[in-house]
Image: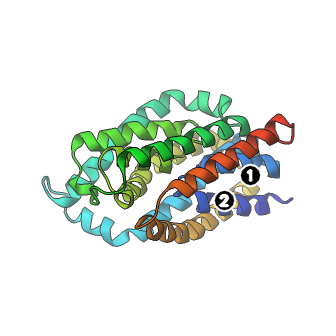
Amino acid sequence: MPLIIKAIIMGIVEGLTEFLPVSSTGHLIIAGDFLGFKGSRFNITFEIVIQLGAILAVIFYYRKKIYNSLLNLAPGRSGFRLWSNIFIAFIPSALLGVFLNDYIETYLFSSFTVAIALVVGGVLMILTENAFGRYGLNEIEKAGFGQSLLIGIAQCLALFPGMSRSASTIMGGLAAGFSLKGAAEFSFFLAIPTMIAASLFSLLKGIGAMGVLEWQALGAGFIVSFIVALIAIDKFLSYVSNRSLKPFAYYRIVFGILILFLVLSGYLK
């Protein structure tokens, strides 16, 4: 299969799964196994960098809110409180990720580890929603220091491929007192600095493995992930306004068990 076609398929997978609590990285690793798109420095860089397309979708979707927040960055104003909370939540995984990045890419990017994380994360989602309910804070700018820090600590779970950054931060948001929709929105905004930093860090490490064909594949995956993610964000926010996360949790558990079976049967590595 031509590299550009593989890139488009991977872009679709990324766009669909980046903001759903099912692990985009995990699905990309599994899709890469099926497509034979794995192993090289470029493949790892591609799987991380195309997430920038999905992040651009968030920025475009929330462009008015982001613009207004930037007009109100004076201390004490709503924009200052919003981005202060995002910065606080960003710090834990950023610090931990710098130290663990090489270990994670070397030892944890496999279908087996993703399958385990999918199942464990699904169970945690069910327990978290049962424990903390659906009702609470909706506005990011009204969160306190402790609430933002708790969400940031929860995001560290997502360093393990398959746990899902979205699932981890939404669970952290529920535990911190957010509503399900408020936790999802916090997760989306937190993705902006988190994934930009992770993508640029990976791109700098892998730029030496990039030729013309690789740049074309990266561009195609980027554009496709942007378009698909833009649709997924709108649908997911509409869904969580009055529904439960449990169907996503059940999907994770069933899918994780299926992948684990395929790995143990020798169909996936």
Relative to 193, say whether 230 is above or below: below
- The residue tagged 1 is 31
Name the residue at 71% across, 42% down.
257
Question: 199 or 137, which is in the foreground?
Answer: 137
x and y, in percent, of residue 117 in the image: 61, 38
**Which SS class for mark 2?**
helix
Name the residue at 45% across, 30% down.
96
Q: Which mark is residue 237?
A: none
Q: Quadrant of the C terminus?
A: top right
Based on the displayed image, in which of its 4 quarters is residue 226 positioned? bottom right
Left or right, 160 with reference to 6: left
In this view, which residue lies farthest toward the front? 130
x and y, in percent, of residue 194 in the image: 44, 47
Q: Residues within 10 Å of mark 1 (few under 14, many from 20)?
A: some
x and y, in percent, of residue 216 in the image: 71, 61
Q: What is the distance, in whole Å, between disc 1 and disc 2 at their CAs?
A: 8 Å
Name the residue at 34% across, 58% down.
182
Q: Residues within 10 Å of mark 2 (few under 14, many from 20)?
A: many
- The residue tagged 2 is 13
Relative to 77, say whether 100 is above or below: above
Question: 1 or 177, which is in the foreground?
Answer: 177
**Which SS class for mark 1?**
helix
Q: Are marks 1 and 2 in contact (CB under 8 Å)?
A: yes
Q: Quadrant of the N terminus?
A: bottom right
Residue type at mark 1? Ala
Residue type at mark 2? Val
